[in-house]
Structure formats: structure tokens, C-alpha cells
Amino acid sequence: MKNRKNILTYIVAAFSIVVTSASSSLGVPPLQHPLLLGLAPVAALSNSDEPPSGCWTATGSLNTARYYHTAALLPTGKVLVAGGWDGFNPFTSAELYDPVSGMWNKTGSLNTARELHTATLLPNGMVLVAGGRDSSGQPSVSAELYDPELETWTATSSLNTAREEHTASLLPNGLVLVAGGLDSSGEPSASAELYDPALGTWTATCSLNTARREHTASLLLNGTVLVAAGRGTGFVVLSSAELSATQTATPTPTASVTPTTTPRITPRPRPTPHPRPTP
């Protein structure tokens, strides 16, 4: 490859000398000759076959090799990687990447081994991990929350539908929309549900028009979610896409203590006087 570039550069240079001599006899400035216009980028080809530097830089390796895992950026700037597959089984291990040191440190393990799940950063700074394939090889209904301060996982309410290869989108109102995926029947699902972080509960919502798995979900600026492509029933590769309805519901506010006040006593109504009998 290097030799070919050298030959090309030599040919262009020789051609330039010939045209320059002809240009001089015609009184045309060499760089304005029509045969020379546009040749500068070709003549400037590099002799090096090396890729450009400064694109990617190696950083610290994970403590555990994995794939089918999730990664979530925390408010602290660290990245939480959780679960995944080691080539034999799903596992519970999780670790944190520190961009300052470029190192990975182990953190609290998941309560349930899983792969092909989702991880969503919630407005309160916690991470919701939902569904996935468990150690039995089946789609899971379990979900749990990671607390970055305590570095621990706590179980939360289970999904209404076991699923893996689904999507999860944080909506502007703070709810999490989970859609599609592979269900326990071994088929793509059209079901969708909403997680309320304040209540820690899941509620079924409008189903997709097309059952799908391994699709994408993108939150649009108008608050709707665009679901695109994926695989449908019978492993058919889909080209269809659909939009969710705008979610107008607001999450239930966290319960707060209401100050105790002395209730006002409603005065008892006076009895109606009976008329005196006429003598």
C-alpha cells in the first residue's frame, strides 16, 4: 500500500511539472491551470499506513469479563456496570468505573443474577434494574434498586410481565416506561408497563401495536417514546416503528408527615323549639 502511494505521488509530481511548463508557454498561472486544480489533496497523500492517533485510549480493565450487561452513569460521574453473562451463566457482580483514576472497583452485588436486563438512572439518583434472563434461563419479573451512597441493592416490586431484551425509558414525569421484550412463553411481547419510583410499583399501560424484542426506544423532545425495529414473532426482522402516547400522569409524591392540628369542633345544632299549645 505504501509503495502504491509513493508511485501515485511521483506520477502527480511529474504531471505537475509537465503542465507547469505548458502553462508558462501559454501565460497561464500554474496553480490556475484546469488540469492542476484539485490535485493538491492527491499530492498530499500520507506515506504512512498507520491509523490516526488520539481516537481511543486504553483504560483500566474490568474485574470481571462480561457481556449482555448494563452500564449507567451515576450523578457522581462514576459508571455502574451490573450483571451480564460470562459465557456460561448470568451473574450478580457489579462494579464502578472511576473516570478520575481510570480504575474499576467492585461494589455491592445484585440480589438476582441476570443478563439482557435494563438499567435506568432515576431522578433520585438510584438505579433501577429490571427484568432480564435469570440463572434458570428464563425471563425474570424481578427488579431492584441500587443506592450509590450505600452501594447496596434493594428489591422493589416485580414487573407484571417477565421479560428480557426489552427497553426502559425514563419519562419527563419521572416514571419509567418498559416495553416489549421476550416473555416467558418464548415469544416477543407487546406489553408495556410503568414504574413509579415513589410507590415502587408497576402499572400496566397501553401495549405496543407490534410485539417486538431487541428493539430500540428513544425519548423525544415532546415527551413521547419512539420504539423502532427489533425482532418480531418467528424471528422476523422488523422495520416498523411506533410512538407512545404522551405520558401526562405524574408520579405519586413521596409520603410526608402532615403536622397534627387540633380539629375544630362543629357546634351541635340547636333543637327546634316546639310551639306552645294555645290555651
Image (cartoon, rainbow, N blue to C red):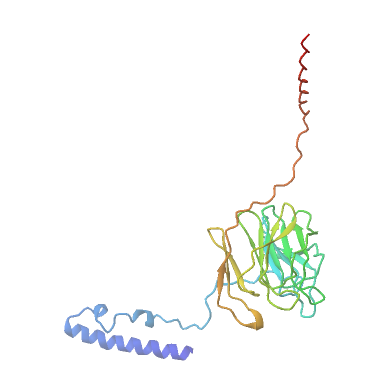
Most foreground residue, 166 or 262: 262
Q: Position of residue 117 (x, y in %)?
A: 72, 69
Q: Position of residue 19 (x, y in %)?
A: 25, 86
Most foreground residue, 236 or 6: 236
Residue 89 seen in this snapshot: yes
- Residue 20 as seen in the image, left or right of residue 7: left
- Residue 242 as seen in the image, left or right of residue 195: left
Q: Residue furthest front?
A: 279
Q: Position of residue 230 (x, y in %)?
A: 61, 76
Residue under the point 17% across and 81% down? 27
278 lies above or below 220: above
- Residue 3 as seen in the image, left or right of residue 28: right
222 lies above or below 279: below
Q: Position of residue 240 (x, y in %)?
A: 55, 75
Q: Residue furthest top?
A: 279
Q: Residue furthest left?
A: 26
In the rendered image, the quadrant that contains the C terminus is top right
Most foreground residue, 274 or 185: 274
- Quadrant of residue 58 in the image? bottom right
Residue under the point 67% across and 60% down? 176
The mark total stands at: 0
- Quadrant of residue 259 in the image? top right
- Quadrant of residue 276 in the image? top right
270 lies above or below 246: above
Residue 99 seen in this snapshot: no
